[in-house]
Image: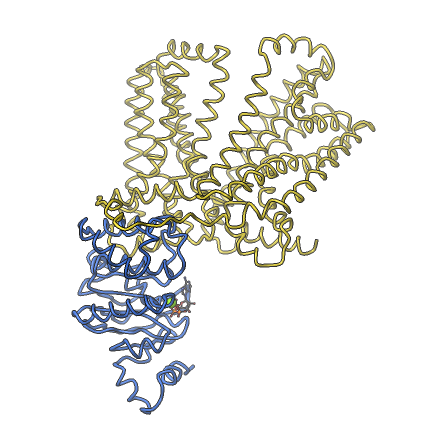
Chain colours: A yellow, B blue
Amino acid sequence: MNKTLRLIRTMLKMQYSLAGKSSGEKIGYVLLAIFLIPFSGIIISVLNAIVETLYDQLAPTGNENALLGLLFVGMTIVLLFVSLSSVLSSFYFAEDIEGFIPYPFHPYQLLAGKAAAPFINLYVTSGVLMVPILTLYGIHSGAGFTYYIFALLLFLVFPVIPFTMMAILLMFFMRFANIAKNKDRTKVFAGLLTFVFIIGFNVIIRLNQNPEQTAEGAAQLIEQQNGLLNVITGMIPTAYFSTMALQNAKGLNGLFFLMLMLAISAGAIFLFLTAGQKFYFKGVLGLTAGSTKKFDSGKVAKKIKSQPVFLALLLKELRIIFRTPTFFMQIVVQSLFGPVFLIVILVFESSSGSIGALGSMLEQFDGKAPLLLLFIFTLFILGVNPASYSSISRDGRSWPANLYLPVSAKTVIFSKVMTAWLINLLSIILLAVVGLTVVPMPPALFTAWIALTFLASWFTSLVGTALDLNDPKLNWTDEQEVFKSRFISLIALLIEMGTFGCIVLLLWNIDSLQSLWMTSLLLALLLGLAIVISHIVLQKLIRTKFLKTR
Amino acid sequence: MITIKNVTKEYAGKTAVKNLDLVVPDGKIFGFLGPNGAGKSTTIKMITGILPIDDGIITVNGYDIASQPIEAKKIFGYVPDSPDIFLRLKGIEYLNFIGDIFDIPKDTREEKIEDLTKSFGIYEALDDHIQTYSHGMRQKIVVSGVLLHDPDVWILDEPLSGLDPKSSYTLKEMMREHAAKGNTVFFSTHVLEVVEQLCDEVAIINKGKLQFRGNMKEMKEQFEADETLEKVFLELTSNE
Ligand SMILES: Nc1ncnc2c1ncn2[C@@H]1O[C@H](COP(=O)(O)OP(=O)(O)OP(=O)(O)O)[C@@H](O)[C@H]1O
Ligand SMILES: [Mg+2]
């Protein structure tokens, strides 16, 4: 036990230590904390309004606990997703495990150490939503002291089940991924498969609910106490148990459900460690090995072609992104999450006909409003562009090659901006497909929107690359570190959304500006200006930082 | 020819190289020796433009690395001390990349890649990711990259450390040929036998300062003639 704790501490220290961070980064943390104070105030007041309204509406029929049920169900789904990406990266993509294997540790001990970092992610995630909502619910329902104790305990154990379920599922898939020949590709694939598995699972649940029936049933369900809760938590028993525990926090009944939750969680941990002891090494050992094949005589000629330097650099960047599992997950898959999610939701909703209505609604409004909304929404999706803010850091120890090879700094940097833009193109194409098929958008609006999106994408690519060049992280031993505990993504988003949020708000409120074309033209001009400014800043950074970067 | 004039480099308060003056002439194999942490890699990184120079001037065939970097970089080829770069590229992709950067015509590229990788015995692994290469194989692919663009000046940081005897022999032969054609070969090493059989001239650096520069004969003459190179080296670098 002692050794396991030591191991956990060491592993955490290696990932989260502030030592060796530049002072710029430390200042960044402080600034971020300051930024977050007003932000969290807004969030809490919004949450408060939601909890209050729902509580007041549900309480008369004795269905207020559906609110808790909804929270726990929602949290389960969110935690499953967070677990997926953090387990995958911590257990399988992070190659630091090789450093520990030669020491006499049991698989379950290493697994416990590796689970620590994902757990921190999970607690941060659930802390953001669960803590304020549970507290607000407690206040509105006038709950007693035991409620808060129960809530705290539930907060602590609740992430255990989604995490262990996801981890066991992944360990199982990975055990087979490890047999494959091209392991880099297969481990990404296994991750995606698990993702599809969860989505599919949700789809099946949704499809089994006949919408008319549920609408009709809901009216009846509300009549009876707990009726709504039973439906909401139907598929996720732990959400039901947690709700019941909190609901009855005063009585023995509540204690029973709390104990049940604790017991299930303990059982899940046991199951996780047992499964880990059995499967983990089979999945992870040798997973970093690549495939090799023999290069036959005379093949050289076929593999060689001359390209301009810029294209050679661009291809190199794309190859590295698509071949490195961590980069692929964090950059390509992550940036597609938003659009894919949108499509899944839209496809669902379109069966109920509400999307068609949205399309005709857009048609009616054919002024500036839909364009401005679409624009800011797309900017948000493109702003979350890890390809841009990992531009420099991705190179890691290969970075010096940019310094000793005879290529100008400008060519190197702009090949990276171009890479980020191209990766964004994937999201744009997906969004465009949605705009053309699922939501039938008016052609004028569609054209204006797509044109602006191309410009916006260049802008976010420039901003991200400039920020990374300003303070890159090159000394990583594991690709995860390029993305972990760096606030660069938030800063990028703040810059982009800050400027264009204000601009959109301004345009929205200028009454004399109504036409779609004028608005697009104005936005295009402003984007052009933003691009010119970012170019100048980036050029300056190239002059001052490029050679000093290492 | 490489000229290093009064060059100084500090790392966060610690001086790694101090007032170094060194000229690496054409047509000779020049060895750069010194104990661990002496400042060899630091010097080489300044020559190649990886580290900015705090003070002093470095030129490669007359081009100042600080003010005419691209021109200078076209002239030299560099083998870094750690060959762990571009691991996610395939060997052939790496060589092709170098070919694009240095504008090497397609048919020259084809011919040279085949010749070089066959003589180093990594031809069959060309279609694999560099990640799957052994340490020595990685070194060979980097060396092949340098030889592919055939620069006048070779700058090699411990190029022989991971190579097997045959490849080591091949590379040494190549270094001799290159110098014999009147070019510059500058390399760092710890292996004194290599120095003895290969180098025309040597420089010994310790704690960032030049301790000795001259040819092998001068070096032995400075001490009693019967001393081994090992003893000479130990003596030169032992003074605190
Ligand atoms: N990135 C760095 N940051 C701080 N100090 C460094 C850094 N790199 C090297 N040094 C210091 O500079 C000095 C010279 O190091 P250098 O790498 O040039 O030695 P070397 O002669 O190449 O040694 P070796 O034979 O071990 O390769 C050492 O004292 C080392 O501690
Ligand atoms: Mg060295």
From the viewer's perspective, is A265 left or right of A469?
Answer: right
Displayed quadrant of residue B76: bottom left
Furthest-right residue in view? Answer: A252
Q: Vertically, is A150 above or below B89?
A: above
The extreme front residue here reads A297
- Residue A336 x/y as whole percent: 43, 31
Residue A539 quadrant: top left
Where's the N terminus of chain B, which quadrant?
A: bottom left
Q: Position of residue B82 (x, y in %)?
A: 38, 61
The residue nearer to you, when weighing A486 against A338, is: A338
A431 left or right, relative to A57:
left
Q: Indicate which quadrant contains ligand 1.
A: bottom left
Quarter holding residue B77: bottom left
Q: Which of A97 and A490 is in front in this view?
A: A97
Q: Where is residue A496 in the image (x, y as percent from the top left)?
A: 39, 33
**Left or right for A95, reference A141:** left
- Can residue B68 be seen here? The reply is no
- Along the line of sight, the residue nearer the viewer: A114 or A274: A274
Please name the residue shown 63% across and 55% down the image: A105
**Would you say B57 lies left or right of A34 here?**
left
Instruction: Name the residue located 59 percent from the left edge and 20 percent from the top edge.
Output: A205
Compared with residue A259, is residue B17 higher up or lower down, i.e. above or below? below
Where does the image place residue A274, in percent across and percent down from the top left? 67, 44
Is residue B59 at least partly visible in the picture? yes
Quarter of the figure with the C terminus of chain B: bottom left
| Above/below status of A204 relative to B232 | above
Q: Total number of numbered labels?
A: 0
